[in-house]
Image (cartoon, coloured by chain):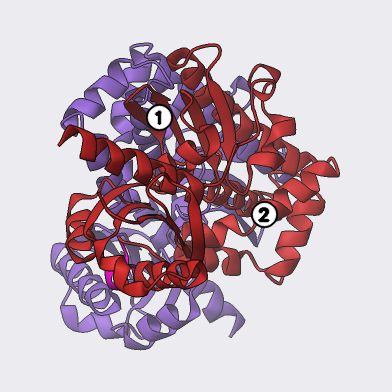
Chain colours: A red, B purple
Amino acid sequence: MPDFIVGIDGGGTSCRAAVAARDGFILGRGKSGAANILTDPDTALANILAATQGAFREAGIDERHIVSAAALVGVAGHNVGEAVHYVRARLPFARAAIESDGLIALQGALGDRDGAVGILGTGTLYIIRQAEAVRYLGGWGFAVGDLGSGARLGHAALQECLLAHDGIHEKTALTRALLDEFGNDPGRIVEFARAAHPGDFGRYAPTVFDHAERHDATALSIIRAAAATIDEALDTVARLTGPDDGLCLLGGLAKLYIPYIAERHASRVGQPLADALTGAVALAAARFAAAEVTS
Amino acid sequence: MPDFIVGIDGGGTSCRAAVAARDGFILGRGKSGAANILTDPDTALANILAATQGAFREAGIDERHIVSAAALVGVAGHNVGEAVHYVRARLPFARAAIESDGLIALQGALGDRDGAVGILGTGTLYIIRQAEAVRYLGGWGFAVGDLGSGARLGHAALQECLLAHDGIHEKTALTRALLDEFGNDPGRIVEFARAAHPGDFGRYAPTVFDHAERHDATALSIIRAAAATIDEALDTVARLTGPDDGLCLLGGLAKLYIPYIAERHASRVGQPLADALTGAVALAAARFAAAEVTS
Protein backbone atom coordinates (compact mmCIF):
# COMPACT_ATOMS: atom_id res chain seq x y z
CA MET A 1 0.00 0.00 0.00
CA PRO A 2 1.33 3.46 -0.87
CA ASP A 3 2.30 5.90 1.88
CA PHE A 4 0.30 8.70 0.30
CA ILE A 5 -2.71 8.96 -1.93
CA VAL A 6 -3.47 11.79 -4.33
CA GLY A 7 -6.78 13.08 -5.64
CA ILE A 8 -6.85 15.20 -8.80
CA ASP A 9 -9.71 17.39 -10.03
CA GLY A 10 -8.68 18.28 -13.55
CA GLY A 11 -10.74 20.90 -15.33
CA GLY A 12 -10.65 22.96 -18.49
CA THR A 13 -9.51 26.10 -16.66
CA SER A 14 -7.58 24.75 -13.68
CA CYS A 15 -6.28 21.58 -12.05
CA ARG A 16 -6.49 20.98 -8.31
CA ALA A 17 -4.68 18.26 -6.37
CA ALA A 18 -4.79 17.03 -2.77
CA VAL A 19 -2.37 14.69 -1.04
CA ALA A 20 -3.79 12.57 1.76
CA ALA A 21 -2.78 9.90 4.23
CA ARG A 22 -3.76 6.32 3.44
CA ASP A 23 -7.06 6.78 5.28
CA GLY A 24 -7.98 9.73 3.07
CA PHE A 25 -7.18 12.49 5.56
CA ILE A 26 -6.13 15.47 3.43
CA LEU A 27 -2.66 16.84 4.27
CA GLY A 28 -2.20 19.48 1.61
CA ARG A 29 -3.66 21.03 -1.55
CA GLY A 30 -2.20 22.50 -4.71
CA LYS A 31 -3.48 24.21 -7.85
CA SER A 32 -2.25 24.79 -11.38
CA GLY A 33 -3.51 25.54 -14.90
CA ALA A 34 -5.85 23.70 -17.28
CA ALA A 35 -5.92 19.91 -17.48
CA ASN A 36 -7.83 19.03 -20.63
CA ILE A 37 -6.65 15.54 -21.62
CA LEU A 38 -8.55 15.64 -24.91
CA THR A 39 -7.33 18.91 -26.40
CA ASP A 40 -3.89 19.23 -24.78
CA PRO A 41 -2.74 16.08 -22.95
CA ASP A 42 0.87 17.21 -22.45
CA THR A 43 -0.15 20.45 -20.77
CA ALA A 44 -2.65 18.44 -18.71
CA LEU A 45 0.16 16.11 -17.57
CA ALA A 46 2.41 19.05 -16.69
CA ASN A 47 -0.38 20.71 -14.71
CA ILE A 48 -1.33 17.49 -12.90
CA LEU A 49 2.31 17.23 -11.75
CA ALA A 50 2.51 20.94 -10.85
CA ALA A 51 -0.69 20.80 -8.77
CA THR A 52 0.54 17.62 -7.03
CA GLN A 53 3.92 19.23 -6.24
CA GLY A 54 2.03 22.19 -4.76
CA ALA A 55 -0.04 19.84 -2.59
CA PHE A 56 3.09 18.02 -1.33
CA ARG A 57 4.81 21.33 -0.59
CA GLU A 58 1.78 22.57 1.37
CA ALA A 59 1.72 19.29 3.31
CA GLY A 60 5.47 19.54 4.00
CA ILE A 61 6.11 16.16 2.38
CA ASP A 62 9.21 15.58 0.27
CA GLU A 63 8.21 15.61 -3.43
CA ARG A 64 10.23 12.43 -3.97
CA HIS A 65 7.26 10.57 -2.49
CA ILE A 66 5.10 11.50 -5.51
CA VAL A 67 6.47 8.60 -7.58
CA SER A 68 5.38 6.08 -4.93
CA ALA A 69 1.91 7.59 -4.41
CA ALA A 70 -1.39 6.19 -5.75
CA ALA A 71 -3.63 8.71 -7.49
CA LEU A 72 -7.18 9.00 -8.74
CA VAL A 73 -7.49 11.54 -11.52
CA GLY A 74 -10.90 12.98 -12.36
CA VAL A 75 -11.05 14.62 -15.79
CA ALA A 76 -13.41 15.32 -18.64
CA GLY A 77 -12.87 12.89 -21.50
CA HIS A 78 -12.26 9.87 -19.25
CA ASN A 79 -14.28 7.77 -21.71
CA VAL A 80 -12.14 8.60 -24.75
CA GLY A 81 -9.80 5.60 -24.79
CA GLU A 82 -6.86 7.04 -26.68
CA ALA A 83 -6.48 10.14 -24.52
CA VAL A 84 -6.79 8.09 -21.33
CA HIS A 85 -4.13 5.59 -22.41
CA TYR A 86 -1.74 8.37 -23.38
CA VAL A 87 -2.15 10.24 -20.11
CA ARG A 88 -2.24 7.24 -17.79
CA ALA A 89 1.04 5.90 -19.22
CA ARG A 90 2.74 9.23 -18.47
CA LEU A 91 1.41 10.08 -15.00
CA PRO A 92 4.14 10.46 -12.36
CA PHE A 93 2.52 8.12 -9.81
CA ALA A 94 3.22 4.47 -8.87
CA ARG A 95 -0.41 3.64 -9.54
CA ALA A 96 -3.21 5.74 -11.03
CA ALA A 97 -6.82 5.48 -12.11
CA ILE A 98 -8.61 7.93 -14.39
CA GLU A 99 -12.29 8.61 -13.79
CA SER A 100 -14.75 11.19 -15.04
CA ASP A 101 -14.81 14.65 -13.52
CA GLY A 102 -18.50 13.91 -12.95
CA LEU A 103 -17.86 10.84 -10.81
CA ILE A 104 -15.51 12.66 -8.43
CA ALA A 105 -18.07 15.47 -8.19
CA LEU A 106 -20.75 12.91 -7.31
CA GLN A 107 -18.52 11.29 -4.68
CA GLY A 108 -17.76 14.71 -3.21
CA ALA A 109 -21.42 15.76 -3.19
CA LEU A 110 -23.02 12.53 -1.92
CA GLY A 111 -20.15 10.82 -0.10
CA ASP A 112 -20.77 7.07 -0.13
CA ARG A 113 -24.52 7.49 -0.41
CA ASP A 114 -26.41 6.25 -3.47
CA GLY A 115 -28.00 8.92 -5.61
CA ALA A 116 -27.43 11.29 -8.48
CA VAL A 117 -25.96 14.62 -9.41
CA GLY A 118 -26.85 16.95 -12.23
CA ILE A 119 -23.97 19.11 -13.40
CA LEU A 120 -25.33 22.32 -14.90
CA GLY A 121 -22.51 24.41 -16.34
CA THR A 122 -21.27 25.21 -19.84
CA GLY A 123 -22.52 21.68 -20.59
CA THR A 124 -25.04 19.47 -18.80
CA LEU A 125 -24.52 15.93 -17.49
CA TYR A 126 -26.39 13.68 -15.06
CA ILE A 127 -24.68 10.87 -13.13
CA ILE A 128 -26.46 8.17 -11.17
CA ARG A 129 -24.73 5.82 -8.75
CA GLN A 130 -26.45 2.77 -7.27
CA ALA A 131 -24.01 0.68 -5.22
CA GLU A 132 -21.16 0.04 -7.70
CA ALA A 133 -23.15 0.82 -10.82
CA VAL A 134 -22.60 4.25 -12.36
CA ARG A 135 -24.75 5.52 -15.19
CA TYR A 136 -24.43 8.71 -17.24
CA LEU A 137 -27.24 10.66 -18.91
CA GLY A 138 -26.60 13.52 -21.29
CA GLY A 139 -23.17 15.09 -21.48
CA TRP A 140 -23.00 14.65 -25.24
CA GLY A 141 -21.62 18.11 -25.89
CA PHE A 142 -22.94 21.26 -27.53
CA ALA A 143 -23.06 19.97 -31.13
CA VAL A 144 -26.09 17.77 -30.52
CA GLY A 145 -26.80 17.73 -26.78
CA ASP A 146 -26.18 19.57 -23.52
CA LEU A 147 -29.78 20.76 -23.33
CA GLY A 148 -30.22 23.39 -20.65
CA SER A 149 -26.50 24.16 -20.58
CA GLY A 150 -25.00 27.62 -20.37
CA ALA A 151 -23.82 27.24 -23.95
CA ARG A 152 -27.37 26.50 -25.08
CA LEU A 153 -28.77 29.46 -23.12
CA GLY A 154 -26.27 31.85 -24.68
CA HIS A 155 -26.91 30.42 -28.14
CA ALA A 156 -30.67 30.80 -27.70
CA ALA A 157 -30.25 34.41 -26.57
CA LEU A 158 -28.23 35.31 -29.68
CA GLN A 159 -30.78 33.56 -31.87
CA GLU A 160 -33.49 35.68 -30.24
CA CYS A 161 -31.47 38.79 -31.14
CA LEU A 162 -31.74 37.93 -34.83
CA LEU A 163 -35.46 37.18 -34.52
CA ALA A 164 -35.91 40.54 -32.76
CA HIS A 165 -33.83 42.32 -35.40
CA ASP A 166 -36.06 40.83 -38.12
CA GLY A 167 -39.23 41.87 -36.23
CA ILE A 168 -40.31 38.24 -35.85
CA HIS A 169 -40.16 38.49 -32.06
CA GLU A 170 -40.62 41.70 -30.07
CA LYS A 171 -37.46 43.29 -28.74
CA THR A 172 -37.06 43.15 -24.98
CA ALA A 173 -34.36 44.44 -22.64
CA LEU A 174 -32.31 41.24 -23.10
CA THR A 175 -32.21 41.32 -26.89
CA ARG A 176 -31.73 45.10 -26.91
CA ALA A 177 -28.74 44.79 -24.59
CA LEU A 178 -27.14 41.99 -26.61
CA LEU A 179 -27.81 43.66 -29.97
CA ASP A 180 -26.18 46.79 -28.52
CA GLU A 181 -23.14 44.75 -27.58
CA PHE A 182 -22.80 43.71 -31.23
CA GLY A 183 -23.25 47.28 -32.50
CA ASN A 184 -26.80 46.43 -33.63
CA ASP A 185 -25.23 44.54 -36.51
CA PRO A 186 -26.77 41.08 -36.90
CA GLY A 187 -23.92 40.13 -39.24
CA ARG A 188 -21.52 40.43 -36.31
CA ILE A 189 -23.68 38.05 -34.25
CA VAL A 190 -23.60 35.53 -37.09
CA GLU A 191 -19.81 35.90 -37.38
CA PHE A 192 -19.42 35.42 -33.62
CA ALA A 193 -21.68 32.36 -33.58
CA ARG A 194 -19.89 30.69 -36.49
CA ALA A 195 -16.57 30.85 -34.66
CA ALA A 196 -17.87 30.39 -31.09
CA HIS A 197 -16.90 27.52 -28.81
CA PRO A 198 -19.45 26.36 -26.21
CA GLY A 199 -17.72 28.46 -23.54
CA ASP A 200 -18.10 31.58 -25.71
CA PHE A 201 -21.87 31.07 -25.88
CA GLY A 202 -21.93 30.14 -22.21
CA ARG A 203 -20.57 33.50 -21.17
CA TYR A 204 -23.98 34.98 -22.02
CA ALA A 205 -25.88 32.61 -19.71
CA PRO A 206 -25.59 34.77 -16.58
CA THR A 207 -26.97 37.73 -18.57
CA VAL A 208 -30.01 35.63 -19.49
CA PHE A 209 -30.61 34.74 -15.82
CA ASP A 210 -30.15 38.39 -14.79
CA HIS A 211 -32.83 39.50 -17.22
CA ALA A 212 -35.16 36.65 -16.26
CA GLU A 213 -34.96 37.78 -12.66
CA ARG A 214 -36.18 41.18 -13.84
CA HIS A 215 -39.10 39.43 -15.63
CA ASP A 216 -37.78 39.97 -19.17
CA ALA A 217 -40.15 37.98 -21.42
CA THR A 218 -37.43 36.72 -23.79
CA ALA A 219 -35.11 35.64 -20.98
CA LEU A 220 -37.98 33.92 -19.14
CA SER A 221 -39.04 32.04 -22.25
CA ILE A 222 -35.45 30.85 -22.92
CA ILE A 223 -34.91 29.73 -19.33
CA ARG A 224 -38.31 28.09 -18.94
CA ALA A 225 -37.73 26.04 -22.10
CA ALA A 226 -34.26 25.07 -20.85
CA ALA A 227 -35.55 24.24 -17.36
CA ALA A 228 -38.18 21.97 -18.95
CA THR A 229 -35.37 19.93 -20.55
CA ILE A 230 -33.68 19.68 -17.14
CA ASP A 231 -36.98 18.56 -15.57
CA GLU A 232 -37.29 15.81 -18.20
CA ALA A 233 -33.77 14.58 -17.49
CA LEU A 234 -34.41 14.67 -13.73
CA ASP A 235 -37.65 12.68 -14.26
CA THR A 236 -35.51 9.93 -15.79
CA VAL A 237 -33.01 10.27 -12.94
CA ALA A 238 -35.90 9.91 -10.46
CA ARG A 239 -37.08 6.70 -12.19
CA LEU A 240 -33.58 5.25 -11.91
CA THR A 241 -32.99 6.14 -8.23
CA GLY A 242 -34.70 5.33 -4.96
CA PRO A 243 -36.91 7.82 -3.09
CA ASP A 244 -34.31 8.21 -0.33
CA ASP A 245 -31.31 8.56 -2.63
CA GLY A 246 -29.38 11.81 -2.64
CA LEU A 247 -29.77 14.42 -5.39
CA CYS A 248 -27.46 17.39 -5.82
CA LEU A 249 -27.21 19.98 -8.57
CA LEU A 250 -23.67 21.18 -9.19
CA GLY A 251 -21.97 23.51 -11.65
CA GLY A 252 -22.09 27.23 -12.17
CA LEU A 253 -25.77 27.40 -13.11
CA ALA A 254 -27.15 25.01 -10.44
CA LYS A 255 -28.28 27.66 -7.97
CA LEU A 256 -29.59 29.92 -10.72
CA TYR A 257 -31.83 27.16 -12.11
CA ILE A 258 -33.47 26.21 -8.78
CA PRO A 259 -36.36 28.74 -9.05
CA TYR A 260 -37.20 27.49 -12.56
CA ILE A 261 -37.15 23.70 -12.20
CA ALA A 262 -40.25 21.76 -11.15
CA GLU A 263 -41.09 21.65 -7.44
CA ARG A 264 -40.99 17.81 -7.51
CA HIS A 265 -37.27 18.06 -8.23
CA ALA A 266 -36.37 21.27 -6.40
CA SER A 267 -37.77 19.87 -3.15
CA ARG A 268 -35.44 16.84 -3.41
CA VAL A 269 -32.24 18.77 -4.09
CA GLY A 270 -29.79 18.70 -1.18
CA GLN A 271 -26.57 20.55 -0.40
CA PRO A 272 -23.39 18.82 -1.58
CA LEU A 273 -21.31 17.41 1.31
CA ALA A 274 -17.98 18.39 -0.23
CA ASP A 275 -16.34 19.36 -3.49
CA ALA A 276 -15.02 17.24 -6.36
CA LEU A 277 -11.42 17.33 -5.10
CA THR A 278 -12.54 15.79 -1.80
CA GLY A 279 -14.46 13.24 -3.87
CA ALA A 280 -11.32 12.35 -5.83
CA VAL A 281 -9.39 11.77 -2.60
CA ALA A 282 -12.20 9.64 -1.14
CA LEU A 283 -12.38 7.52 -4.31
CA ALA A 284 -8.59 7.15 -4.29
CA ALA A 285 -8.58 6.02 -0.66
CA ALA A 286 -11.37 3.49 -1.30
CA ARG A 287 -9.91 2.26 -4.58
CA PHE A 288 -6.35 1.67 -3.47
CA ALA A 289 -7.22 0.37 -0.01
CA ALA A 290 -9.73 -2.04 -1.59
CA ALA A 291 -7.18 -3.11 -4.22
CA GLU A 292 -4.72 -3.86 -1.42
CA VAL A 293 -7.23 -6.09 0.35
CA THR A 294 -8.36 -7.97 -2.73
CA SER A 295 -4.94 -8.43 -4.35
CA MET B 1 -28.43 48.15 -75.67
CA PRO B 2 -26.96 44.66 -75.88
CA ASP B 3 -28.17 42.21 -78.51
CA PHE B 4 -28.64 39.47 -75.93
CA ILE B 5 -29.33 39.26 -72.24
CA VAL B 6 -28.34 36.47 -69.94
CA GLY B 7 -29.89 35.25 -66.70
CA ILE B 8 -27.89 33.12 -64.28
CA ASP B 9 -29.21 31.01 -61.41
CA GLY B 10 -26.08 30.07 -59.49
CA GLY B 11 -26.47 27.50 -56.74
CA GLY B 12 -24.32 25.42 -54.45
CA THR B 13 -24.77 22.28 -56.50
CA SER B 14 -25.34 23.58 -60.05
CA CYS B 15 -25.41 26.71 -62.16
CA ARG B 16 -28.06 27.35 -64.79
CA ALA B 17 -27.99 30.00 -67.50
CA ALA B 18 -30.48 31.26 -70.09
CA VAL B 19 -29.83 33.53 -73.04
CA ALA B 20 -32.72 35.72 -74.18
CA ALA B 21 -33.57 38.35 -76.75
CA ARG B 22 -33.70 41.97 -75.57
CA ASP B 23 -37.37 41.60 -74.68
CA GLY B 24 -36.62 38.66 -72.37
CA PHE B 25 -37.79 35.89 -74.70
CA ILE B 26 -35.63 32.88 -73.81
CA LEU B 27 -33.69 31.40 -76.74
CA GLY B 28 -31.59 28.73 -75.03
CA ARG B 29 -30.57 27.25 -71.70
CA GLY B 30 -27.38 25.70 -70.30
CA LYS B 31 -26.26 24.02 -67.11
CA SER B 32 -22.96 23.40 -65.34
CA GLY B 33 -21.52 22.67 -61.89
CA ALA B 34 -21.62 24.57 -58.57
CA ALA B 35 -21.45 28.37 -58.44
CA ASN B 36 -20.70 29.28 -54.85
CA ILE B 37 -19.09 32.73 -54.97
CA LEU B 38 -18.26 32.68 -51.25
CA THR B 39 -16.44 29.38 -50.92
CA ASP B 40 -15.01 28.99 -54.44
CA PRO B 41 -15.33 32.09 -56.62
CA ASP B 42 -13.03 30.87 -59.40
CA THR B 43 -14.98 27.65 -59.91
CA ALA B 44 -18.17 29.74 -59.77
CA LEU B 45 -16.83 32.00 -62.54
CA ALA B 46 -15.83 29.00 -64.67
CA ASN B 47 -19.26 27.42 -64.23
CA ILE B 48 -21.11 30.67 -64.97
CA LEU B 49 -19.19 30.84 -68.26
CA ALA B 50 -19.74 27.14 -69.02
CA ALA B 51 -23.50 27.36 -68.40
CA THR B 52 -23.69 30.50 -70.55
CA GLN B 53 -21.78 28.81 -73.38
CA GLY B 54 -24.24 25.91 -73.15
CA ALA B 55 -27.17 28.31 -73.42
CA PHE B 56 -25.67 30.05 -76.47
CA ARG B 57 -24.97 26.69 -78.12
CA GLU B 58 -28.56 25.55 -77.49
CA ALA B 59 -29.85 28.82 -78.97
CA GLY B 60 -27.55 28.47 -81.99
CA ILE B 61 -25.92 31.84 -81.29
CA ASP B 62 -22.19 32.34 -81.81
CA GLU B 63 -20.45 32.34 -78.42
CA ARG B 64 -18.49 35.45 -79.44
CA HIS B 65 -21.65 37.41 -78.54
CA ILE B 66 -21.21 36.52 -74.85
CA VAL B 67 -18.75 39.38 -74.30
CA SER B 68 -21.29 41.93 -75.55
CA ALA B 69 -24.24 40.52 -73.57
CA ALA B 70 -25.73 42.00 -70.38
CA ALA B 71 -26.27 39.53 -67.53
CA LEU B 72 -28.03 39.34 -64.21
CA VAL B 73 -26.44 36.80 -61.90
CA GLY B 74 -28.41 35.44 -58.94
CA VAL B 75 -26.24 33.79 -56.30
CA ALA B 76 -26.07 33.14 -52.57
CA GLY B 77 -23.70 35.54 -50.86
CA HIS B 78 -24.69 38.54 -52.98
CA ASN B 79 -24.47 40.69 -49.84
CA VAL B 80 -20.86 39.81 -49.05
CA GLY B 81 -19.04 42.73 -50.65
CA GLU B 82 -15.64 41.22 -51.22
CA ALA B 83 -16.89 38.12 -53.03
CA VAL B 84 -19.21 40.20 -55.22
CA HIS B 85 -16.46 42.63 -56.25
CA TYR B 86 -14.12 39.77 -57.08
CA VAL B 87 -16.68 37.93 -59.21
CA ARG B 88 -18.23 40.96 -60.91
CA ALA B 89 -14.82 42.19 -62.10
CA ARG B 90 -14.15 38.81 -63.74
CA LEU B 91 -17.52 38.03 -65.37
CA PRO B 92 -17.30 37.55 -69.17
CA PHE B 93 -20.16 39.97 -69.98
CA ALA B 94 -20.19 43.59 -71.21
CA ARG B 95 -22.41 44.52 -68.26
CA ALA B 96 -23.50 42.50 -65.26
CA ALA B 97 -25.41 42.84 -62.02
CA ILE B 98 -25.24 40.44 -59.10
CA GLU B 99 -28.37 39.84 -57.02
CA SER B 100 -29.40 37.32 -54.39
CA ASP B 101 -30.55 33.87 -55.41
CA GLY B 102 -33.63 34.71 -53.34
CA LEU B 103 -34.54 37.77 -55.40
CA ILE B 104 -34.44 35.91 -58.72
CA ALA B 105 -36.56 33.17 -57.12
CA LEU B 106 -39.07 35.81 -56.00
CA GLN B 107 -39.14 37.37 -59.48
CA GLY B 108 -39.69 33.96 -61.01
CA ALA B 109 -42.42 33.01 -58.56
CA LEU B 110 -44.37 36.30 -58.45
CA GLY B 111 -43.42 37.92 -61.76
CA ASP B 112 -43.78 41.70 -61.38
CA ARG B 113 -46.39 41.37 -58.62
CA ASP B 114 -45.67 42.65 -55.11
CA GLY B 115 -45.46 40.02 -52.43
CA ALA B 116 -43.19 37.61 -50.66
CA VAL B 117 -41.55 34.23 -50.93
CA GLY B 118 -40.37 31.92 -48.21
CA ILE B 119 -37.52 29.65 -49.23
CA LEU B 120 -37.63 26.47 -47.17
CA GLY B 121 -34.64 24.28 -47.94
CA THR B 122 -31.40 23.40 -46.17
CA GLY B 123 -31.72 26.96 -44.83
CA THR B 124 -34.71 29.28 -44.49
CA LEU B 125 -35.10 32.81 -45.86
CA TYR B 126 -38.05 35.14 -46.45
CA ILE B 127 -38.00 37.90 -49.06
CA ILE B 128 -40.56 40.67 -49.35
CA ARG B 129 -40.85 42.99 -52.34
CA GLN B 130 -43.04 46.10 -52.32
CA ALA B 131 -42.57 48.14 -55.52
CA GLU B 132 -38.79 48.68 -55.62
CA ALA B 133 -38.17 47.94 -51.92
CA VAL B 134 -36.80 44.48 -51.13
CA ARG B 135 -36.52 43.23 -47.55
CA TYR B 136 -35.00 40.01 -46.21
CA LEU B 137 -36.02 38.15 -43.05
CA GLY B 138 -34.02 35.25 -41.66
CA GLY B 139 -31.41 33.55 -43.79
CA TRP B 140 -28.75 33.96 -41.11
CA GLY B 141 -27.39 30.44 -41.51
CA PHE B 142 -27.37 27.31 -39.38
CA ALA B 143 -25.03 28.56 -36.63
CA VAL B 144 -27.61 30.87 -35.09
CA GLY B 145 -30.65 30.98 -37.40
CA ASP B 146 -32.41 29.15 -40.23
CA LEU B 147 -35.25 28.09 -37.93
CA GLY B 148 -37.44 25.48 -39.59
CA SER B 149 -34.75 24.59 -42.13
CA GLY B 150 -33.88 21.09 -43.26
CA ALA B 151 -30.60 21.40 -41.38
CA ARG B 152 -32.48 22.24 -38.18
CA LEU B 153 -34.91 19.34 -38.67
CA GLY B 154 -32.08 16.85 -39.14
CA HIS B 155 -30.20 18.27 -36.17
CA ALA B 156 -33.30 18.01 -33.97
CA ALA B 157 -33.85 14.40 -35.05
CA LEU B 158 -30.30 13.42 -34.08
CA GLN B 159 -30.69 15.22 -30.77
CA GLU B 160 -33.85 13.19 -30.14
CA CYS B 161 -31.85 10.01 -30.79
CA LEU B 162 -29.54 10.84 -27.88
CA LEU B 163 -32.50 11.69 -25.61
CA ALA B 164 -34.11 8.39 -26.58
CA HIS B 165 -30.86 6.51 -26.01
CA ASP B 166 -30.66 8.03 -22.51
CA GLY B 167 -34.28 7.10 -21.78
CA ILE B 168 -35.23 10.77 -21.38
CA HIS B 169 -37.68 10.56 -24.29
CA GLU B 170 -39.43 7.38 -25.40
CA LYS B 171 -38.02 5.71 -28.50
CA THR B 172 -40.23 5.88 -31.57
CA ALA B 173 -39.83 4.53 -35.10
CA LEU B 174 -37.91 7.66 -36.17
CA THR B 175 -35.30 7.54 -33.41
CA ARG B 176 -35.04 3.75 -33.66
CA ALA B 177 -34.37 3.99 -37.40
CA LEU B 178 -31.74 6.71 -37.01
CA LEU B 179 -30.04 5.02 -34.04
CA ASP B 180 -29.89 1.88 -36.16
CA GLU B 181 -28.22 3.84 -38.93
CA PHE B 182 -25.48 4.82 -36.46
CA GLY B 183 -25.06 1.24 -35.17
CA ASN B 184 -26.94 2.19 -31.98
CA ASP B 185 -23.79 4.00 -30.90
CA PRO B 186 -24.58 7.52 -29.63
CA GLY B 187 -20.87 8.34 -29.80
CA ARG B 188 -21.05 8.01 -33.58
CA ILE B 189 -23.95 10.47 -33.69
CA VAL B 190 -21.92 12.96 -31.66
CA GLU B 191 -18.92 12.47 -33.97
CA PHE B 192 -21.12 12.99 -37.03
CA ALA B 193 -22.74 16.11 -35.59
CA ARG B 194 -19.41 17.70 -34.64
CA ALA B 195 -18.18 17.46 -38.23
CA ALA B 196 -21.52 17.99 -40.01
CA HIS B 197 -22.23 20.85 -42.39
CA PRO B 198 -25.83 22.13 -42.65
CA GLY B 199 -26.40 19.99 -45.75
CA ASP B 200 -25.32 16.87 -43.84
CA PHE B 201 -27.99 17.50 -41.20
CA GLY B 202 -30.47 18.47 -43.91
CA ARG B 203 -30.24 15.07 -45.56
CA TYR B 204 -32.26 13.68 -42.61
CA ALA B 205 -35.14 16.14 -43.09
CA PRO B 206 -37.08 13.99 -45.61
CA THR B 207 -36.86 11.06 -43.15
CA VAL B 208 -38.45 13.24 -40.46
CA PHE B 209 -41.32 14.20 -42.80
CA ASP B 210 -41.77 10.55 -43.82
CA HIS B 211 -42.19 9.49 -40.21
CA ALA B 212 -44.46 12.42 -39.40
CA GLU B 213 -46.76 11.33 -42.20
CA ARG B 214 -46.98 7.96 -40.44
CA HIS B 215 -47.90 9.77 -37.17
CA ASP B 216 -44.57 9.15 -35.44
CA ALA B 217 -44.74 11.19 -32.21
CA THR B 218 -41.10 12.34 -32.29
CA ALA B 219 -41.24 13.37 -35.93
CA LEU B 220 -44.54 15.21 -35.41
CA SER B 221 -43.19 17.09 -32.41
CA ILE B 222 -40.03 18.15 -34.32
CA ILE B 223 -42.00 19.29 -37.36
CA ARG B 224 -44.73 21.06 -35.40
CA ALA B 225 -42.13 23.04 -33.47
CA ALA B 226 -40.36 23.91 -36.74
CA ALA B 227 -43.63 24.83 -38.47
CA ALA B 228 -44.43 27.16 -35.55
CA THR B 229 -41.22 29.10 -36.27
CA ILE B 230 -42.23 29.34 -39.94
CA ASP B 231 -45.70 30.57 -38.90
CA GLU B 232 -44.10 33.30 -36.79
CA ALA B 233 -41.92 34.42 -39.68
CA LEU B 234 -44.92 34.39 -42.05
CA ASP B 235 -46.89 36.47 -39.50
CA THR B 236 -44.21 39.13 -39.84
CA VAL B 237 -44.27 38.75 -43.63
CA ALA B 238 -48.07 39.23 -43.53
CA ARG B 239 -47.71 42.45 -41.49
CA LEU B 240 -45.26 43.81 -44.07
CA THR B 241 -47.32 42.95 -47.17
CA GLY B 242 -50.78 43.80 -48.43
CA PRO B 243 -53.72 41.39 -48.31
CA ASP B 244 -53.67 40.95 -52.09
CA ASP B 245 -49.92 40.50 -52.41
CA GLY B 246 -48.58 37.19 -53.66
CA LEU B 247 -47.09 34.59 -51.33
CA CYS B 248 -45.15 31.55 -52.52
CA LEU B 249 -43.21 28.92 -50.62
CA LEU B 250 -40.18 27.62 -52.52
CA GLY B 251 -37.35 25.20 -51.82
CA GLY B 252 -37.20 21.47 -51.32
CA LEU B 253 -39.31 21.42 -48.14
CA ALA B 254 -42.05 23.87 -49.22
CA LYS B 255 -44.63 21.28 -50.26
CA LEU B 256 -43.83 19.03 -47.31
CA TYR B 257 -44.47 21.85 -44.82
CA ILE B 258 -47.87 22.89 -46.20
CA PRO B 259 -49.92 20.43 -44.02
CA TYR B 260 -48.15 21.68 -40.88
CA ILE B 261 -48.25 25.47 -41.22
CA ALA B 262 -51.18 27.51 -39.94
CA GLU B 263 -54.28 27.69 -42.12
CA ARG B 264 -54.08 31.51 -42.20
CA HIS B 265 -50.83 31.15 -44.17
CA ALA B 266 -51.48 27.91 -46.07
CA SER B 267 -54.65 29.39 -47.57
CA ARG B 268 -52.68 32.36 -48.98
CA VAL B 269 -49.91 30.32 -50.58
CA GLY B 270 -50.04 30.34 -54.38
CA GLN B 271 -48.23 28.38 -57.08
CA PRO B 272 -45.04 30.01 -58.39
CA LEU B 273 -45.42 31.39 -61.94
CA ALA B 274 -41.95 30.29 -63.01
CA ASP B 275 -38.56 29.25 -61.72
CA ALA B 276 -35.60 31.30 -60.52
CA LEU B 277 -33.80 31.15 -63.89
CA THR B 278 -36.82 32.72 -65.58
CA GLY B 279 -36.77 35.31 -62.80
CA ALA B 280 -33.11 36.10 -63.50
CA VAL B 281 -33.88 36.64 -67.19
CA ALA B 282 -36.86 38.87 -66.40
CA LEU B 283 -34.81 40.98 -63.98
CA ALA B 284 -32.03 41.23 -66.58
CA ALA B 285 -34.45 42.38 -69.25
CA ALA B 286 -36.00 44.98 -66.93
CA ARG B 287 -32.68 46.15 -65.53
CA PHE B 288 -30.81 46.67 -68.77
CA ALA B 289 -33.76 48.00 -70.78
CA ALA B 290 -34.53 50.48 -67.96
CA ALA B 291 -30.88 51.51 -67.79
CA GLU B 292 -30.95 52.17 -71.52
CA VAL B 293 -34.01 54.41 -71.21
CA THR B 294 -32.75 56.43 -68.25
CA SER B 295 -29.13 56.81 -69.44
The foreground one among B39 and B28 is B39
Quarter in which the C terminus of chain A is drawn = top left
Is the residue marked by circle 2 packed among few (<14), some (14-19), or many (20+) residues within 10 Å? many
Residue A106 in the image, given as x and y percentages of width and height: 47, 37
- Residue type at the position of mark 1: Lys
Q: Residue at x 30, y 60 (%)?
A: A38
Per the rendering, the mark at residue A161 is 2
- Asked whether residue B1 is in view, the answer is no
**Corner quadrant of residue B93:** bottom left
- Residue type at the position of mark 2: Cys
Outermost residue toward the right in this view: A214
Residue B165 in the image, given as x and y percentages of width and height: 32, 25
Residue B161 vertical position relative to residue B26 in the rendered view, above or below = above
- Asked whether residue B106 is in view, the answer is yes
- Can you identify the residue that label 1 sits on? B255
Question: How far apart are labels 1 and 2 at the CA level?
Answer: 29 Å
Q: Magenta span covers which residues?
A: A38-44
**Corner quadrant of residue B16:** bottom left
Is the residue marked by circle 1 packed among few (<14), some (14-19), or many (20+) residues within 10 Å? few
